[in-house]
Image (cartoon, rainbow, N blue to C red):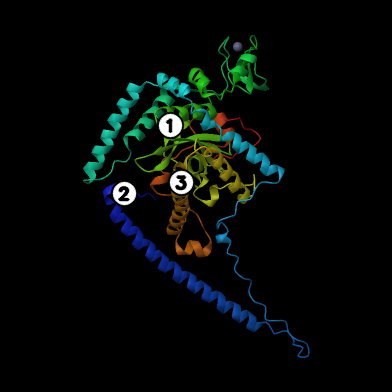
Amino acid sequence: MEHTHSAPRAHAANIDTDRLAAEMTEQFRQVLSSKRMNELTSRSSQSRSSSPAPRDFGTPQPPPSQSAPPTYASLRNIPLVPEAPHDARSLRFKNMLVSLSNMPVRWENPGLLDEALRVIPLEQIYGEAEEESQILQAEAESMSAGKKAAWGYQDCVVRALLRWFKRSFFSWVNNPPCSRCYSPTVAVGITSPLPDEQARGANTVEAYRCSHDACKNYERFPRYNDAFVLLQTRKGRCGEWANCFTMLCRAVGSRVRWVWNAEDHVWTEVYSVHRRRWVHVDVCEEAWDKPRLYTDGWGKKLSYCIAFSADGAMDVTRRYVRDAKHAAERNRAPEAVFLHIMDEIRAMRRSNMSKQDKFRLHGDDMREAKELRANVISSIAIAVIQLSPEDIVNAQVTRRQDSDAQKALEGRLSGNTQWIRSRGEGGQSNQQDPRNQHPR
Ligand SMILES: [Zn+2]
C-alpha cells in the first residue's frame, strides 16, 4: 500500500488520517473491550467451576493475593541521572568516544580549509546550487503563494558538493589492483606503516597480494585519516570518504557533524539553516536526508549513532533507528554512564566558550532532543495507525509498507557485492555475518 499524495493535498490527507485514526481508535477500543470482557467471563467461570480449597477456620488467612502492580516498563526512559564511569568496560568506551570526538576539531584549521577551497571547483558548485535553489523556489511558489522552498541555497551548495565528490572526486577502494600487472589482489592482513606513511598519519596499512602466479607482487593500502592527505590520495572506504567530505562541507561554510556508528559506518550531518535542523548526508551513497537508509534500506540493526562536532556531541541514534526491530542492544556502558560521558565531551568542546555561546548551543541541544523524541512518538503513532484492531488483539504485528519516508530505500551501493554481503548491508534478503567483516 503506497500513499503518494502531493503537497497541496497534504492538508486534506491529514484530516483523512485524523478521521481514520479516530475511527481506528474507536474500533480498537471496542475489540479490546470485548476481548477483556470475554477473558473476565471465562476466568470467573473457571474459578467457579474449580472447587474452592477447604478452609481451615482456625488459622488466620493470608491477605487476598493482589494482582502484581504494573511495571511501567514503558516509562523506563524517564530522565536518568548521569553517573561517572567506574568499570573498565565503560572507561574503554569513554576513551574511545573522547578520541573519536577529536575528528571534527582537526578540521578547524584555516590552512586545511583554504587548501580544500583550492581543490573544490567552486564555480561549478555554486552555479549548480544557484540553479537548483531557483528551481525549488519556483516549485514552491507554483504550489501556493508564500510557500517555502524545500531546501535553501546553502543546502543546495552541499547537495552539489555531494554529487561532485561522489561522481568526480573520490574513488572507492575494495582491494587495490596490482600496480605492476593490474591483476586483482587478495587481502593478506595488516602490516605496520612505513616511515613516510606514518608521517602522513596512517596508523594501519592493509596488505594485498597479486593473484597472478607470475607476479605475486605485494600492494599496500595505507588507511589515512588526515583530511589534508585525503585531498591528495582521493580514495578509500567510508572512513576516508566521510572524513574528507565532511571537512569540505565545513570549508564551504556549513556547520558539520561527523556521525560515528558502532556497527562500523560513519557519515555526515550538515545543519540546514533553512529547515532549522540537522540533515543526514552519506557521501558514499550520495544520500541526502535519508536517515532510514541503514535500517529500512540496508536492513541493519544499529545500537549507537553519535554525532560529533567542533562544538558539541549528541546521541542521534533515534534519528536513524525509528522502531524497535532495528534497535541493536546498547551494552557498551550503562545508559546513565553514557549520558555522563556525553556531558563530559560536550563540556570539553565548550570549555573555552563564552556564557552566551554555551547558552545558545544548549538551546540547540534541547530543541534537537525534542525533535528526536518526536521521531519516536510519530513512529509509534504510524505503527498504531497501520495496525488493524484484529492485528493488535491477535498479536499479528506485521508492519505494512511505510509511507513516503521509506520509499525507494535500497541496499548499499558503495563497495562490491561480495563486500556488501559480508557486512550484511545489501538490504532485503541478506544476513549479517560477523565473522567476515572488513574495516570501514
Ligand atoms: Zn601483479
Under mark 2, the amino acid is His
Under mark 3, the amino acid is Phe
The tag on residue 309 is none
Q: Residue furthest bottom?
A: 57
Under mark 1, the amino acid is Glu
Residue at coordinates 71% horizontally, 42% vertically from top-left?
Answer: 88
Please give the count of numbered marks on the rendered protein: 3
Q: Does the rendering let one see residue 433? A: no
The tag on residue 5 is 2
Mark 3 or 1, nearer chain start: 1
In front: 402, or 244?
A: 244
Q: Are marks 3 and 1 in contact (CB under 8 Å)?
A: no
Pick the quarter of the image with the C terminus.
top right
The residue pinned by badge 1 equals: 286
Q: Residue furthest front?
A: 354
Please indicate whether residue 276 sits to the left or right of residue 99 in the image.
left
Residue mark closest to the camera, 3 vs 2: 3
In front: 125, or 353?
A: 353
Residue mark closest to the camera, 2 vs 1: 1
Mark 2 or 1, nearer chain start: 2
Q: Are marks 3 and 2 in contact (CB under 8 Å)?
A: no
The residue pinned by badge 3 equals: 359
As helix, strand or loop, the secondary structure at mark 2 comes to loop
Query: How far across and how far down the image is residue 394, in percent?
Result: 52, 63
Residue mark closest to the camera, 3 vs 1: 3
